[in-house]
């Protein structure tokens, strides 16, 4: 149960401690992101979409994604990007690509995560974010698409 009187710092420590108890820390996030994008890069459907945008600058993308996942999973607060516009400009991406992305993310977690709880912890968050990205990119069925 969350302590409603905790300061932001105390809350962050509580989240970190809970994540650490199921094996999630900065070191695991770094391994997860490296392993996931190694698979993305060679994936026949997703690889070319990333390659077109990221080109030679995978180092910057990986660093950004490690900071993103540390914010999402550990409440680390360092990530300052804007995922919605970053994806809205990807006109090649179709709704079906999200299922592929999520399946590849789950498989990477199942192959690398220290505990089963860690798999669920990341997948819960990835599913939620994927849903909101798809809503922003493709809209609700039957409503106009909100794409620039
Ligand atoms: C079909 C699925 C997806 C594709 C093809 C895709 C592709 C990409 C590409 C190409 C970029 C680089 C954009 C740039 O640097 O300009 C990017 C950035 C990013 N993606 Fe995805 N993505 C997908 C799903 C997701 C999901 C499900 C998440 C989160 C759970 C996510 C999180 C992010 C974040 C945080 C960034 C960095 C945004 C920024 O700060 O600029 N993506 N994605």
Image (cartoon, rainbow, N blue to C red):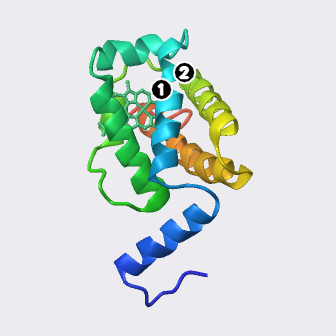
The C terminus - image quarter: top left
Cβ(mark 1) to ligand 1 < 8 Å? Answer: no
Q: Is residue 124 visible?
A: yes
Q: Write down the residue under mark 1.
A: 37
Quadrant into which the N terminus falls: bottom right
Figure check: 67 above or below 92: below
> In the current view of this chain or complex, which residue is farthest to the bottom?
5
| Residue at position x 30%, y 36% in the image | 85
At which x and y percent is residue 2?
A: 55, 81
Task: Determine whether the beta carbon of the residue marked 2 sits less than 8 angstroms from the nearest atom of ligand 1.
Answer: no
Residue 60 x, y percent position in the rendering: 27, 31
Measure the C-alpha gap from mark 2 to mark 1. Answer: 5 Å
User: Residue tagged by mark 2?
Assistant: 39
Ligand 1, seen in the image, is in the quarter at top left
Q: Position of residue 137 (x, y in %)?
A: 42, 32
Please tell me which residue is depicted at 36% across the width and 77% down the height of the picture: 8
Q: Secondary structure at mark 2?
A: helix
Is 130 positioned to the left or the right of 80 in the image? right
Which residue is situated farthest in the right direction here?
A: 116
10 on left or right of 106: left
> In the shown orientation, is residue 3 left or right of residue 109?
left
Left of 147 or right of it: where is 135?
A: right
Q: Residue at x 39, y 43 (%)?
A: 66
Residue 71 or residue 129, whichever sits in front: 71
Give the total number of marks visible in the rendering.
2
Disc 2, disc 1: CB below 8 Å?
yes
Q: Nearer the viewer, residue 62 or 50?
A: 62
Examine the rendering and report whether any part of residue 148 can be seen.
no
- Tell me if mark 1 has few (under 14), some (14-19) or many (20+) residues whose alpha carbon lies within 10 angstroms of its own: many
Q: Is residue 59 above or below residue 22?
A: above
Classify 10 Å Cα crowding around label 2: few (below 14), some (14-19), many (20 and above): some
In this view, the residue in front, 16 or 141, is 16
């Amino acid at each position: 149960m969350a302590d409603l009187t905790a300061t932001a710092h105390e809350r962050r420590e509580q989240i970190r401690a809970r994540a650490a108890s199921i094996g999630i820390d900065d070191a695991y996030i770094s391994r997860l992101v490296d392993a996931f994008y190694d698979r993305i890069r060679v994936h026949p459907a997703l690889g070319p979409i990333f390659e077109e945008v990221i080109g030679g600058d995978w180092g910057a993308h990986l660093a950004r994604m490690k900071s993103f996942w540390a914010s999402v999973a550990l409440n680390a607060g360092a990530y300052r990007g804007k995922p919605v516009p970053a994806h809205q400009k990807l006109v090649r991406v179709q709704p079906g690509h999200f299922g592929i992305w999520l399946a590849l993310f789950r498989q990477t977690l199942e192959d690398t995560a220290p505990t089963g709880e860690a798999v669920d912890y990341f997948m819960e968050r990835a599913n939620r974010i994927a849903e909101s990205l798809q809503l922003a990119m493709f809209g609700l069925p039957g409503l106009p698409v909100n794409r620039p």
